[in-house]
Image: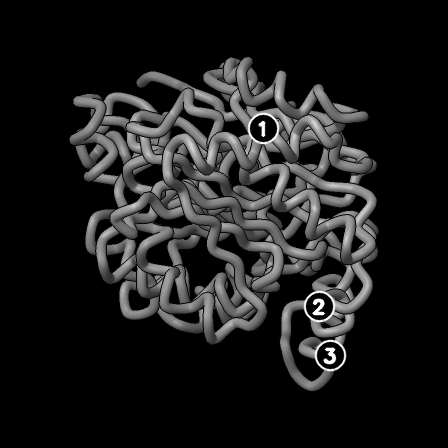
Amino acid sequence: MSITIRECTGASDLKTFARLPYRIYRNNRYWIPPLLQDEIKSLSATGNPAFAQCEAAFWLAERQGRPVGRIAAIINKEYNKKTGEAMGRFSRFECEQDPEAATHLLQTAEAWLRAKGMIGVHGPLGFNNLDGQGLLVEGFDQLPSIASTYHLPYYQKLIEDNGYEKENDWVEFRLTIGEVPEKALKLNESIKLRYKLKLITFSDTKQLVPYAPKVFRLLNEAFAELPYVSPFSEEMIAFYSKKYFKFLNPRFVKLIEDEQGNLVAFIVSVPSLSSAMQKANGSLFPFGWWHILQAFKKPEVADLFLTGIDPKMQGQGVPAVLITELQKTMLENGVRYVETTGIFETNHKAITTWKNYEHIQHKRRRCYRKLF
């Protein structure tokens, strides 16, 4: 039975593309199903404003008409402009344990990118840094956060057997939260006083939502030099604000403004929704919303999504203020553990911060690179 590669050209194909992981990971206790309608929407130019700065194509691998794998190819024009390097991306790679299918999928994506003038490909990478980065290579027995990704162990071999080599790794930590030392509390107050900083906290979502565009604009500045990051347009800011801020518990978001009222730092965390999203199984209705609501009530685990610092304020102790304030809120709400999102393994300063806590480094994700 030979493999057929079929490009996804219509709504029906894209639905099949989006649904395939639900079969591949069926009965897997660690995979977190995304919201299916959101995932389908992200695959079309009408539903995803990232297409204004990206080109993309999607394919399914089939045996006798049965989908056994999928892949996307993406060209992020803004990122390539930033780096001066014409690199494509492969994304959303999922496959049964079928080396022939994997090879056909990767070669199809490579051929499309080569025809578009790219000199090579790296991935897995999404449209931007909020869209599924990296292949899980360690931590297959760990439940990921909803901001992270899960893959099956054999994916690594399928990719590496096709000539892909490591480009960068992200590492993730699980922290055990203890009481905030009195010394840290005093240091916080000293930093806020010295730089005339104002801590902004929230008790309900209505208070938080107006700050969402400011958070994403600061994210653009804070992450500007990081690999794989391109700036969010105003349309993308509106899209991701609506997509993510509806899941935030406002108590777990801390912002800092300077004396002029400019946002200079933020930290965004959320009570872990991993188990709730598994129960929702890709849909908020009829009962998915209820499982998510329950997850907010008595969280034992919180997921750390994003931290951003104005480059002009880096080195001033501002991250310590954010982390300490968030830690206080977590303790008040019964949180015992924190799951970090990926940190580049070369970011020794951030890694040292997490190692100040009781911790384990339990997950690793990898971005691969291949030149044509």
Q: Quadrant of residue 237?
A: bottom left
Q: Tell me the distance, in whole angstroms, between the alpha carbons under discs 3 and 2.
A: 12 Å
The answer to whether marks 1 and 3 mark residues whose Cβ atoms lie closer than 8 Å is no
* Lower sequence index among marks 1 and 3: 1
- Tell me: residue 291, above or below residue 336: below
- Tell me: residue 340, above or below residue 200: above
The answer to whether marks 2 and 1 mark residues whose Cβ atoms lie closer than 8 Å is no
Q: Can residue 163 be seen here?
A: no
Tell me: 261 left or right of 152: left
Residue hosting label 1: 187
Q: Amino acid at mark 2?
A: Asn
Q: Nearer the viewer, residue 148 or 315?
A: 315
The answer to whether marks 3 and 2 mark residues whose Cβ atoms lie closer than 8 Å is no
Residue hosting label 3: 290
Q: State the residue at coordinates (69%, 54%).
A: 32
User: How packed is label 1: few (under 14 Cα within 10 Å), some, or many (20 or more)?
Assistant: some
Give how far across and how far down residue 276 sits, in percent: 75, 65
Give how far across and how far down residue 313 sits, in percent: 35, 29
